[in-house]
Image (spheres, helix red, strand yellow):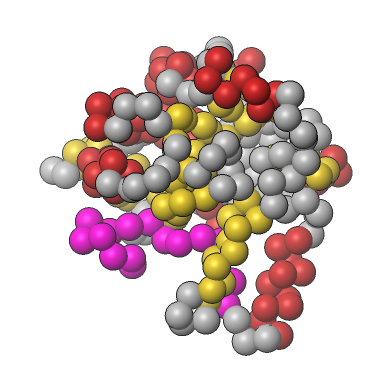
Amino acid sequence: MTTELTSEGRLLAVARTLDRCAVLGPGQRAVIWVQGCPLRCGGCVAAETLPFAEPGTGRPVAELVDWLAGLPGIDGVTLSGGEPFAQAEALTELLDRLAERRPGLSTMAYSGFPLAALRRGSPAQLALLERLDLLVDGPYQAARHADLRWRGSSNQRIHALTPRHAEVLTEPDTSAGLQLSVGLDGSVSWAGVPAVPGFRAELERRLAAGGFELRPADPAPHPSGGTP
């Protein structure tokens, strides 16, 4: 995917963001879900993030850096999606600019591509890989769904790309759980990797029966700091 450039600078196609999350990586983390994925894994828990051509998803990298740099009490940033490595150039710029503003934040990403394939990838993909402390790789396989830490199926792996979080490879490998919140408008947002298959469809059914609307997480921020 070619990153779009505008008068506001480089744009990143963003599905949604979350300012504080404890279930998608070590510690308290901000999360960016990018919009668009070339893979079509059956049972994808974030199917709404798969299409690339979604209007209104372009966000200036500079705006996202400002948002991340201003978040108190976070230990790092997790990139999910969608497929982050489909927008590697913009995400590399984001991480570089964030490191200048908030040195010390750890970095983690998800990818449907195996690490070996990413290491044979484009220069932009290699650059993004070099900036990560942790990577969860591999496509989701519904038939191999399991109760695992930060991932959904047993073919997926956690890779410690730097020594920073090497301890996670020896810690208990069970689900970190889900993070849910209820908005004033009655909507329910959530983040995390379900420990059981079919979780989302069943949750949507039960919430709808109770008059609640489900959305996976908060939408991406607008330049004003609000939400669309």
Residue placed farthest to the front in the image? 73
Q: How many marks?
A: 0
Q: Residue 130's image quarter?
A: top left
- The spot of residue 180 in percent (x, y) is 59, 64
Q: Quadrant of the C terminus?
A: bottom left
Residue 215 in view of the camera: no
- The spot of residue 191 in percent (x, y) is 58, 55
Q: Residue at x 79, y 59 (%)?
A: 198
Question: Measured along the vertical axis of the image, is residue 219 above or below residue 72?
Answer: below
The majority secondary structure of the magenta stretch comes to loop
Residue placed farthest to the top in the image? 120
Residue placed farthest to the left in the image? 7
State left or right for residue 90 relative to residue 80: left
Question: Measured along the vertical axis of the image, is residue 173 above or below residue 44?
Answer: above
Q: Quadrant of the N terminus?
A: top left
* Pick the front one: 191 or 60: 191
Tell me which segment is drawn in magenta: 213-228
State left or right for residue 192 relative to residue 103: right
- The spot of residue 17 in percent (x, y) is 43, 53
Q: Residue at x 65, y 44 (%)?
A: 40
Q: Residue at x 76, y 61 (%)?
A: 199
Question: Measured along the vertical axis of the image, is residue 181 above or below residue 87?
Answer: below
Q: Is residue 178 magenta?
A: no
